[in-house]
Structures are given as C-alpha cells and as structure tokens.
Image (cartoon, rainbow, N blue to C red):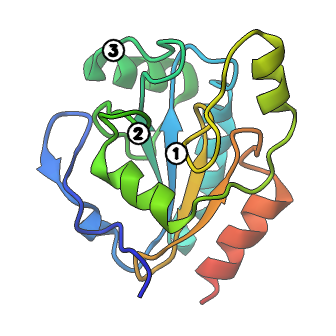
Amino acid sequence: MATSAYNIPVKTIDGTETTLNQYQGKVLLIVNVASKCGLTPQYEGLEQLYKDKKSEGLEILGFPANNFLEQEPGSDEEIQQFCSLNYQVDFPLFSKISVAGEDKHPLYTALISAVPERLGEGPWKKDLIDYGLTPNEAPEVLWNFEKFLVNKSGEIIGRFAPDIQADDARLVDAINAELAK
C-alpha cells in the first residue's frame, strides 16, 4: 500500500495541532510556499485553481517553508497576513515547516519517499544554477512551490516541479483524473 499523508501531525497556521485526516475523501495538492520568492505569484494561480475545483473535492494545502534563500522569513501570523492581503488566499495554510535538510518535517519525508522524482522540471533549475545557487537534487525538494498530489485515499501519487504553474495541463489533468475517481 502506498504511503498515506493523513496521520502525520501538522499545525494549522494559527497553531492548532491536527492531522490531514479531515481531508479524507478529497484530492489534495500540497505545496511548499514562500512569500519572497520569484515564484510567489503562483499563489494567484493556486487560489484560482482552488476556487475552480474546491466544489469538486480539491483542497490545496500550503506549507510555508524558509529552506531556500530564507524566502519565507516571517512568522505564521505575518505569512497569513501577506497571503490574505496580497493574493486573497482562501485555501488552508499551515504553520511554517522545513521541507529539506536534517530538520525536514515528517510530512515532507513521506511525500518525498512516496514520489522521489518530480515531473515537469523546466528552466527553473537551470536558472538557479545560473544565479550561482546549488539547487537540491531529486529526491529532495528543488525549491519553493513544488507540488505533491494526494488521492482521495490519502496516497501520495504525483509530484510536480516548481516550474509547473497551477494552470499547467499536466497538473490540471492529473487533478481532474483523481477528482473523477
């Protein structure tokens, strides 16, 4: 059986201890987000995707992370305020976690081990290298806004590179296929 994301302890952005059990029967898109990244405008597309697909059973779960060039330095309260004011984010946000390195959150350990290769790696990785950075190699999370797809049974079934926008056909088609099941 594939790894389930449901029972791993997480905290909501307001500090409430919980798990993802409340999302059983939903299709989940789990995204590590950041407020000061070149990819931050993806919040807009993610929110639109959420509005378009929520009634069909999609939940987008944002996990702020400060692993990449300290692009998410704020407190949970500051992150929530930024997302609300700048992108009108209505999808659930969680407390800031680590998605890479020795202090990686157990959720991301499970996500990465379930799907070690990401789909759709485009120019972003090369751009990072051109900027003199050393991006993480798979299976580690490459950068902010990497996306993991979880089916209605809690199985981690897909992974999409940070380059993949919320309206990319590869992502939308994968979500639609899961929603139809």
First in residue order: circle 1 vs circle 2: 1
First in residue order: circle 1 vs circle 3: 1
Residue 60 place in picture, x, y as percent: 50, 53
Mark 2–mark 3 distance (CA, rounded to whole Å): 14 Å
* Residue that carries the numbered disc 3 in the rendered image: 78
Numbered circle sitting on residue 31 = 1
* Residue that carries the numbered disc 2 in the rendered image: 63
Specify whether 179 is left or right of 126: left
Q: Quick check: 130 above or below 53? A: above
Q: Residue at x 77, y 70 (%)?
A: 173
Which class describes the residues within 10 Å of circle 2: few (<14), some (14-19), or many (20+)? many
Quadrant of the image occupied by residue 177: bottom right
Q: Quick check: 119 above or below 138? A: below
Q: Residue at x 19, y 55 (%)?
A: 9
Which class describes the residues within 10 Å of circle 3: few (<14), some (14-19), or many (20+)? few
Q: Residue at x 32, y 30 (%)?
A: 96
The N terminus, quarter of image:
bottom left
What residue type is disc 1 on? Val
